[in-house]
């Protein structure tokens, strides 16, 4: 006859204590790590010094739409003037405001003309490309306090649910992940370079992996990588309702105060291939009409290339970017169309 199975022995209290200690460590240690505030990135003086040295007649501002379109040497050749191209991939109106305010307007004298490249409703989406890793880039263009920037970004913030607020308060690792990522990157740089070479290595890496240098058949979703450009029309928002809460009035006021000829240049998005439908919203024409009236009333100018048949599908590479081989002909075409519309050129 088989003996009955013995009941399991009760867990020793010391085992439960060990489990409790492990759980407490897992939950508690991250909360004790580096409770200090996130360190702000320092202002990058290099673009400021470059402008002061170059003393350009005009400056082009924009994101990768500018970087992949305009060849600086070709522009200088066809215009006969000194132009500086300030292209920050992944930027939007918040950075453009800081560029104009902190880099361009402070020059003595300032450049005669500034041309800002944009797409669709980008100028009235102040929070576009400002969250997460974009914030670190924004900070490199900030000098001291930036009340206009802070006010506009606070106004557009989405209130967080209380569990998320509690998590961020208790676990600083969550909201300091950019800081820790930078520390890892700096440690890697320490292994291969002296501190004097950091800036050059970072700049070289950015240049190597810039959109204009990547293969156009790589399959990368540039729209997603650059902060959801497909969402520029998603809200379908009205210009009049949004402009007062945007950086546009401040851009126009800076240009007016410094007597800068300010031109907004709306780039043409990649035309649809045969058989494909256009992605433009039905309300976009009304938006652009209101934008033009507002800009011209402020003494600035809007140039819209979106209906220009000369900017054909053959110019384009990935998404709305111009293919590297087409930058020179695009620049020549750009100046042929835009140059005669500028004062003093």
Image (cartoon, rainbow, N blue to C red):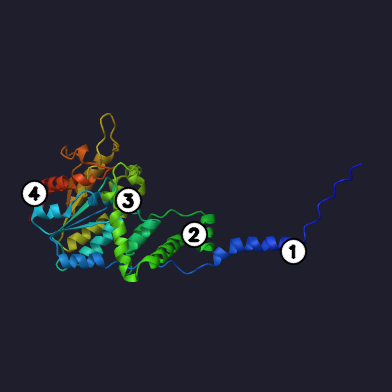
Gap between marks 4 and 1, in whole Å? 85 Å
- The picture places residue 335, in percent across and down from the top left corner, at 12, 49
Give the mark, 1 or 2, whose residue is nearer the N terminus: 1
Question: How far is the residue under mark 4 from the one under mark 3?
Answer: 30 Å
On the question of residue 236 being in view, the answer is no
Disc nearest the viewer among 4 and 3: 4
Query: Badge 4, how many Cα within 10 Å: few under 14, some, many 20+?
Result: few
Q: Are marks 3 and 2 in contact (CB under 8 Å)?
A: no
**Mark 3 or 2, nearer chain start:** 3
Q: Residue 120's mark? A: none
Residue 340: mark in rendering: 4
> Which residue position is annotated with label 3?
125
Q: Closer to the N terminus: mark 4 or mark 2?
A: 2
- According to the picture, the residue beneath numbered tag 1 turns out to be 14
Q: Where is residue 70 in the image (x, y as percent from the top left)?
A: 19, 51
**What residue is drawn where x is 31% and y is 50%?**
242
Residue farthest to the top? 275
Q: Disc 3 or disc 1, which is closer to the eye?
A: 1
* Distance from Cα at disc 4 to Cα at disc 2: 52 Å
| Foreground label between 4 and 2 | 2
Q: Where is residue 178 in the image (x, y as percent from the top left)?
A: 42, 60
Q: What residue did someone put label 2 on?
A: 174
288 lies left or right of 164: left
Q: Quadrant of the N terminus?
A: top right
Element assignment for label 1: helix
Q: 242 left or right of 74? A: right
Q: Nearer the viewer, mark 4 or mark 1?
A: 1
């Amino acid at each position: 006859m088989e003996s009955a199975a013995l009941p399991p022995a009760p867990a020793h209290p010391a085992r439960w204590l060990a489990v409790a200690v492990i759980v407490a460590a897992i939950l508690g240690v991250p909360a004790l790590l580096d409770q200090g505030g996130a360190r702000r990135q320092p202002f990058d003086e290099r673009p400021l010094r470059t402008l002061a040295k170059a003393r350009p007649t005009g400056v082009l501002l924009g994101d990768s739409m500018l970087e992949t379109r305009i060849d600086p040497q070709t522009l200088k050749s066809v215009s006969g003037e000194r132009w500086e191209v300030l292209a920050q991939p992944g930027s939007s109106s918040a950075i453009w405001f800081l560029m104009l305010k902190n880099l361009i307007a402070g020059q003595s004298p300032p450049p005669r003309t500034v041309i800002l490249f944009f797409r669709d409703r980008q100028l009235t989406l102040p929070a576009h490309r400002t969250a997460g890793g974009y914030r670190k880039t924004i900070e490199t263009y900030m000098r001291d306090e930036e009340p206009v920037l802070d006010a506009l970004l606070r106004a557009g913030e989405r209130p967080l649910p209380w569990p998320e607020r509690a998590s961020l308060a208790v676990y600083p690792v969550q909201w300091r992940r950019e800081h820790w990522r930078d520390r890892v990157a700096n440690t890697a740089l320490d292994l291969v370079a002296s501190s004097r070479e950091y800036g050059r290595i970072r700049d070289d890496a950015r240049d190597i992996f810039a959109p204009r240098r990547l293969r156009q058949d790589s399959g990368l979703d540039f729209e997603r990588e650059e902060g959801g450009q497909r969402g520029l029309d998603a809200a379908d928002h009205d210009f009049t309702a949004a402009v007062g809460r945007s950086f546009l009035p401040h851009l126009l006021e800076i240009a007016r105060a410094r007597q800068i000829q300010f031109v907004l240049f709306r780039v043409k998005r990649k035309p649809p291939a045969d058989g494909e439908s256009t992605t433009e919203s039905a309300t976009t024409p009304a938006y652009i009409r209101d934008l033009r009236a507002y800009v011209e009333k402020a003494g600035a100018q809007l140039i819209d290339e979106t209906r220009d048949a000369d900017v054909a599908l053959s110019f384009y590479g990935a998404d709305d970017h111009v293919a590297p081989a087409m930058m020179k002909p695009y620049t020549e075409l750009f100046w042929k169309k835009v140059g005669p519309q500028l004062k003093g050129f």
